[in-house]
């Protein structure tokens, strides 16, 4: 099973990558793909939305924090719009 999870990058200042990673991997383990980054101190977010939508459509589960980030960015509305256009 694949999860969308935060992976810490910054040494002194906390900066996180948002990655698609296998559930059995540790937090700093090898990721399948980097799909964005999150800087909580400067409140900057970069998301590769097509890659995120691809993993969500394939059944990837975001963690709680990543879910909140994606919800704030409006990714789930795009996901629902994509699913509606596929059925119509």
Image: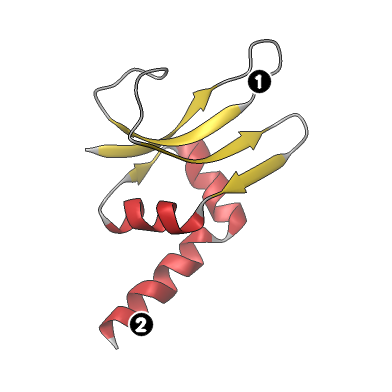
- Can you give x and y, in whole percent of width and height, for residue 3 in the image? 33, 38
**Circle 2 crowding by C-alpha within 10 Å: few under 14, some 14–19, many from 20:** few
Q: Say if 71 sits above or below 81 in the image.
A: above
Determine whether 75 is above or below 2 in the image.
below
The image quadrant of residue 86 is bottom left
Colouring chosen for the image of the structure: secondary structure
x and y percent of residue 69 in the render?
Answer: 57, 45
Which residue is rendered at x = 33% and y = 51% of the image?
55
Dot 1: few (<14), some (14–19), or many (≥20) neighbours within 10 Å?
Answer: few
The residue to which callout 2 is attached is 85
Give the image location of residue 61, x and y in percent: 33, 44
Question: Image quadrant for the N terminus?
Answer: top left
Quarter-of-image position of residue 74: bottom right
Q: Looking at the image, which residue is at 27% across and 29% down?
A: 23
Q: Residue at x 30, y 59 (%)?
A: 57
- The residue indicated by pointer 1 is 14
In the shown orientation, is residue 1 left or right of residue 75? Answer: left
Q: Regarding mark 2 in the picture, which secondary structure is present there?
A: helix
What label sits on residue 57 in the rendered view? none
Query: Residue visible at 63% across and 18% down?
Result: 10
Above or below 38: residue 15: above
């Amino acid at each position: 099973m694949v999860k969308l999870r935060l992976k810490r990058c910054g040494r002194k200042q906390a900066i996180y990558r948002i990655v698609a990673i296998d559930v059995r991997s540790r937090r700093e383990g090898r990721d399948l793909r980097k799909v964005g980054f999150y800087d909580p101190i400067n409140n900057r977010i970069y998301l590769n939305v097509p890659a995120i939508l691809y993993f969500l459509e394939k059944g990837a589960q975001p963690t709680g924090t990543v879910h909140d980030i994606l919800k704030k960015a409006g990714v789930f509305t795009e996901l629902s719009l994509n699913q509606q256009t596929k059925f119509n």
